[in-house]
Amino acid sequence: MAHESRQCTRALTRRTVLKAGTLSTLALAVSGCADEASSEDDDDASAGARSESVADLFDPLRRPTQLTTRVETTGEVFLSWAAGSVAAGELAYIVRVDGVDVATVSGISTTVSVDDPGDDHRFDVRTVDSNGVSSEPTATVLRTAEATTSGVALVLVAEPAVRAVQFRWTRDDGSGADLPAEYRLFRRGDTRPLAVFAADPSRGAAPATDYLLTAATPYVEAEYVLRAYDGNRVDIGEARNRVLVTPRDRTWPVVPTRVSPPEQVAVDANSTVSWSIDEPDVIGVNVSVDGTFVTAVRGPITSVDVVGGDVDSTVQIAAVHVSGAISAATAPMTLPRTGAAQSDSVDRPGFTTDGAVILGPTGSPFVPIGANVSGMDFFWNEKVLGRAESAADEWRWNCVRVGCGMSDWGAVSGGYLYFRNNDLRRLVDEYTGRGIVVVLTQFSSGPDDANGRSGALDSPGGAPDGSGRSIEAALTDWWVHVATMFADNPLVWINPLNEPEGDLDALDRMYRRMMSRLRAVAPRTPIVLDAAYFANDIPNDATIGTGSIDPEQSFVLSRGPSLVADFGEERGFGPIVFSVHVYSRWPVNYGDRGRVTDRQLADRMRAFARDAAVRGVPFLVGETGVEDWAQEYDSASVRVGLYEQGTTRGRPTGVWQELGIGVLAWHTSPSSGMPLAADGEDWASVKDGADASPPPDAGVGLWNYSHSS
């Protein structure tokens, strides 16, 4: 069978105006150190395969996704897909038809010619790096190569997940016109559908166009068919293509309930502390003096010099497991006096705080200014690698917030995941190499409403990956791995959860559980905690009228001081910083539900900053921007926050610059609908503030802020 390929310069694009901060579009979870993890035989003997190790989750060689096909001329099949990723070098794709490699292309689309157009053919695509190493393939698309107007003009897309398959379907011309009244998804050969998706005329709701099939058997390939029905439930045909998908499995590291403390611990006359460890998967020890953390020792080292002070001091050590679990501390041992202050002997590089002020490595105030960008397993496909120079030199950003997702849960909200920015090490190295702080954040929290439902995040089995873990445990497992990867880079900060909802006590307990493990593996790393109420830190039922935020209803103001004290610098750890997202909740008059005036909003912002400073709680604005559905209220938040309070060097100044509060705008992706560049411009090509997005959007205000110092 002969095939030929013509690479196509046009690509299918996706532009969705979506503020996903309150959604849980993604997910995956891991724990432990990739170097320590190993594969185990799969429990399913019929599969005859091996589970993937944790290391595979962070392998930058990632397959393409969302393979679609279209036939306009019989015998000619147009293929398009979303980008994969490679560790280094040029990225290319191998296109395969009926098991035969027919083309290697550099773009994300191509056209192939096939013989026997009336027969079913199989199409898949793999990523290949410059060394010729290729990824796993996409799900296989099965279809004929005949141009036809019969049947239903639908494209069925499938993505494998852990013990699950994510499905989505659209018209093959990309439009939403004349959609059927009902869809049914079948496993080929079955007469009973796996799922039925019907319109609801009473609410004017169209049928769903996505589905996450759970409890799928790992390593067992299955073929799926989508059929459409009219309003009378008459079968009007199947989609243009079928799909072949093989779900994956994963070996999940287990967090031990108990880690044994180090043995044979001793302190000699020179203040050298020594120990031995006889337990697998222990990566080192944490050392405390008088109950305060002073240093971490990693690897096979079994001694460390700890200088005593001019008063009696005691030293203790605790073993750190690869999962972030930590042992009980050893019994206190007296350190010899040296006449020198103990703190002088401890290297404390990186960021610190002075009350509510963040201090950089040089000891000067550090005000984070930058934007949110897309990271690994994210729901937008923008280019981020290769743009740090523009961020640093043109925009003069000193901070970016990198949104990540969790591919192993599938896109549980029906959205797609993109792997274009999946080489997390490369992305971090590029931006921190330009002196830019990278705040890594996690947007996955299971089903759409899990962040807002009491007990949803810590319910056993809540993680949609078949592991039996809670969402919280799965998130923490993932973070332990990431925190271990970047613990030695002071420019990497951790933001564990995006936009949690409201039970202040429950959120406090969850953050404490997460940080107990994170501080074990990354004691010096700055941790950024999103505020409650989707990070706005104002409940919908606030009773403050036009006044200031009630400290008792604010997570930052009421719970922040104790979290800073228990997991921050008072205990010898790195800083704890809070993140507030300033959107439409901020300008609300909570007396009559109208909007406050700009002056009242400015006073509310100033009062919040003042109350945080009094409590010694540092915070930044982790997101702000203008959404179409909340234009009036969001624009007030941006206008007052970034534009209205005066001028600096001839540029408008907002409240946040007036107060020296950091701002990270939402978002560099054009798919956000809240761009930083003017219409038709790409943010990385902006050379002057005139090319940034003007008011009411945040672009010009952010440019002015970063260029005013």
Image (cartoon, helix red, strand yellow):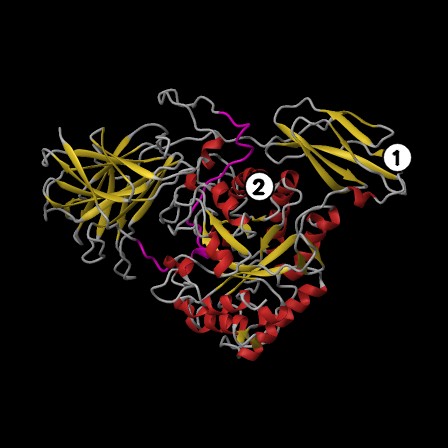
| Among the 4 quarters of the image, the one containing residue 336 | top right
Alpha carbons under labels 1 and 2: distance apart: 34 Å
Position of residue 309 in the picture relative to residue 327 (left or right): right
**Is 30 covered by the magenta stretch?**
yes
Q: Position of residue 407 (x, y in %)?
A: 42, 41
Q: Residue 622: x percent and y percent? A: 54, 59
Residue at 36%, 49% in the rendered image: 415
Q: Residue 672 sits in which quadrant? A: bottom left
Between 233 and 214, the one lying in front of the other is 214
Under circle 2, the secondary element is helix
Name the foreground residue: 56 vs 366: 366
Assign the C terminus to one quadrant of the image.
bottom right
Quick one: label 1, few (<14), some, or many (20+) residues within 10 Å?
Answer: many
Residue depicted at 45% across the width and 66% down the height:
699
Q: Main secondary structure of the magenta part?
A: loop
| Mark 2 residue crowding within 10 angstroms, few (<14) / some (14–19) / many (20+) | some
Residue 313 seen anywhere in this rendered image of the structure: yes
| 706 relative to 329, above or below | below
Of callouts 1 and 2, the N-terminal one: 1
Asked if the magenta segment contains residue 451, the reply would be no
Q: What's the amino acid at mark 2?
A: Phe
Horizontal relation, residue 564 to residue 487: left or right = right
Three-letter amino acid code of the residue under disc 1: Pro
Observer-nearest residue: 128 or 401? Answer: 128
Dot 1 falls on a residue whose secondary structure is loop
Q: Which residues are magenta?
A: 14-38
Q: Which mark is residue 486?
A: 2
Question: Residue 534, how many percent across, how many down?
Answer: 52, 58
